[in-house]
Image: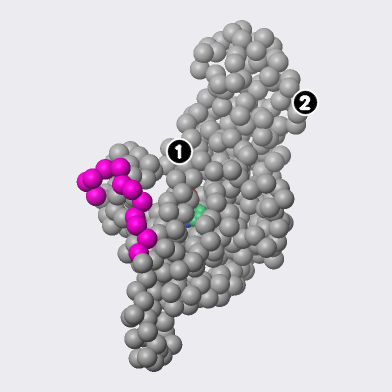
Amino acid sequence: MPSPSPTESSQQKRVLSGLRPTGGVHVGHLVGALGNWVQIQEKFDCYFFIADWHALTTHYADTSQIQKHSLENLMDWLAAGLDPKRAVLFLQSRVPEHAELHLLLSQVTPLGWLERVPTYKEQRENIRDKDLGTYGFLGYPVLQAADILIYKADFVPVGEDQVAHVELTREICRRFNGFYGPIFPEPRPMLTSFPRLPGTDGRKMSKSYGNAIFLSDTEQEIRTKVSSMLTDPARARKSDPGNPDVCPLFSFHKIFSPPATVEMVNRECRRAGIGCVEDKKLMADSLVQALSPIRERRIEYEKNPKQVWDILEEGSKKASRIAQQTMEEVRDGMNLSRTFQSPVRAAKADQKPKKPAPAKKEKSTSD
Ligand code: TRP
């Protein structure tokens, strides 16, 4: 799926994306999502939201932190440069139309499509401490499709791991339009140009792995985390030449350090001219420098959480207006309109039943 070309960027095209409030926002989110959102909010009609209902699909057993995380995530977003004047920033659960559309889309979504989603299979196998054998978890991508379609989004900025969900949204969109008329445009994924940032242990950065550097971390916390970072595992001694290409530290340098430092580290590491300890110190300096303005802004928001909540409230109202309009079209298309229909009109509709679109050819016969 090609990403949109620069000529497609216009105020008219709508962009939508979300993040789940399952914990703090970390540097991986900043590089992979937020940094990109901050740039595109200048060029597109942007909707960014906190997907608290999606957080429930895995965290349903303990909901005590969800509201706190939603508020804190918004603080991180604002501190990172998202601007409520340029983008609509909202909370999923404050726009209940997402749930209504989710229910309607779920009627036309074949089970087999959901069972084959790669993230579904992966997470069922890998997440052992939670029971994910729930209806809600299987339906995760249908809720995501509702999030996207309800705003008629043209583009969905996501990382690689979410592309399958956008593809599924397109399939649900086509099937829905086939039954009820052309209501939704087909959204396209918009891939970020940044590579995925590893965590301090070299695996994907994730709160649940305990390898994340958070936007809320203090300078001291950042330095401590960086000092314990994994480097090229084959470089046992300082006198051994290292390989920056496999070193998680170097991935950070490429993003956060000035070009001259990147060039120097790249050269000197390979000829054992610089050791990992010194290298970490340089990287920590760059990271602290990049994150400190964000942290300073965050501290201001922390002092005034009500103001942050109000931003979410305002944004949710704006989002609701669009969601409500779309739901009127959807209800009309499905003969669920809330306005009075005369029996004559209903009888006419009876005479020309809509032809259902065939479901996509199934590869397996089990569903
Ligand atoms: N599934 C996304 C994630 O885990 C979050 C999400 C929910 C989302 N709804 C969305 C992303 C709609 C893009 C569009 O990161």
Residue 178 image offset from top left, x and y in percent: 42, 63
Residue 12 image offset from top left, x and y in percent: 68, 63
Q: Main secondary structure of the magenta part?
A: loop
Position above or below: 347 against 102: below
Drawn side of residue 222 relative to residue 362, left or right: right
Residue 227 image offset from top left, x and y in percent: 57, 28
Name the residue rendered at 58%, 54% in the picture.
155
Name the residue rendered at 48%, 51% in the picture.
166
Q: Residue furthest left?
A: 366
**Residue 188 belongs to the span the image colors magenta:** no
**Residue 365 belongs to the span the image colors magenta:** yes
Q: Nearer the viewer, residue 55 or 295?
A: 55
Determine which quarter of the picture holds residue 104.
bottom left
Drawn side of residue 84 relative to residue 221, left or right: right
Mark 1 or 2, nearer chain start = 1
| Marking on residue 210 | 1
Q: Secondary structure at mark 1?
A: loop
Q: Is residue 180 visible?
A: yes
Q: Which residues are magenta?
A: 356-367
Position above or below: 350 against 306: below
**Disc 2 residue type (three-letter):** Ala
Residue topped by disc 2: 260
Q: Quadrant of the N terminus?
A: top right
Drawn side of residue 144 relative to residue 44, left or right: left
Position above or below: 32 against 154: above
